[in-house]
Image (cartoon, rainbow, N blue to C red):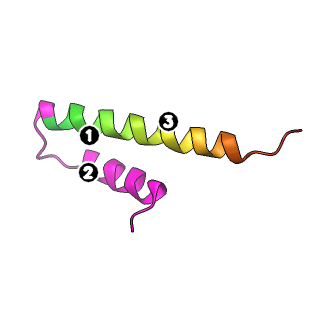
Amino acid sequence: MTTLHDQIQMLRAELTSFHLSNRERRQIEHELKQACAQFAARYHDDEPPA
């Protein structure tokens, strides 16, 4: 099973490809933004109160 962290790393790697159309690049950037937001939300939920 792919973790959210793994998914973020794969999307970042895909963005380094020179063979992406503008549409594909926008789609990957959108997916990356969503994955990062989910990761941040999970981290924030797991953070103990100060």
Are discs 1 and 2 less than 8 Å apart at CB?
A: yes
The kind of residue tagged 3 is Ala
Please state which of residues 49 and 23 is positioned toward the viewer in this rendering: 49
For label 1, the SS is helix
Pick whichever of labels 1 and 3 is earlier in the sequence: 1
**Would you name the residue on which mark 3 appears?**
37
Residue behind mark 1? 28
Question: Quadrant of the image for the N terminus?
Answer: bottom left
Give 27 or 2, whichever is nearer the viewer: 2
Is residue 16 in the magenta section?
yes
For marks 1 and 2, give the one nearer the viewer.
1
Q: Position of residue 23 (x, y in %)?
A: 13, 31
Residue 9 place in picture, x, y as percent: 40, 55
Which segment is the magenta one?
1-23
Q: Gap between marks 3 and 2, in whole Å?
A: 18 Å
How crowded is the residue under tag 2: few (<14 C-alpha within 10 Å), some, or many (20+)?
Answer: some
Residue extending farthest to the right is 50
> Residue at the spot x=40%, y=36% of the render?
34
Q: Residues within 10 Å of mark 1 (few under 14, many from 20)?
A: some
Q: Amino acid at mark 1?
A: Ile
> Please, what is the three-letter code of the amino acid marked with disc 2?
Glu
Q: Is 29 located above or below residue 11 in the figure?
A: above
Residue 3 shown left or right of residue 25 in the figure: right
Q: Dot 3, how many residues are within 10 Å of its Cα: few (below 14), some (14-19), or many (20+)?
A: few
- Which quarter of the rendering shows the C terminus? top right
Percent across and percent down for residue 36 are 47, 40
Are dots 1 and 3 in contact, CB under 8 Å?
A: no
Q: Which residue is mark 2?
A: 14
Q: Secondary structure at mark 2?
A: helix
Q: Main secondary structure of the magenta part?
A: helix
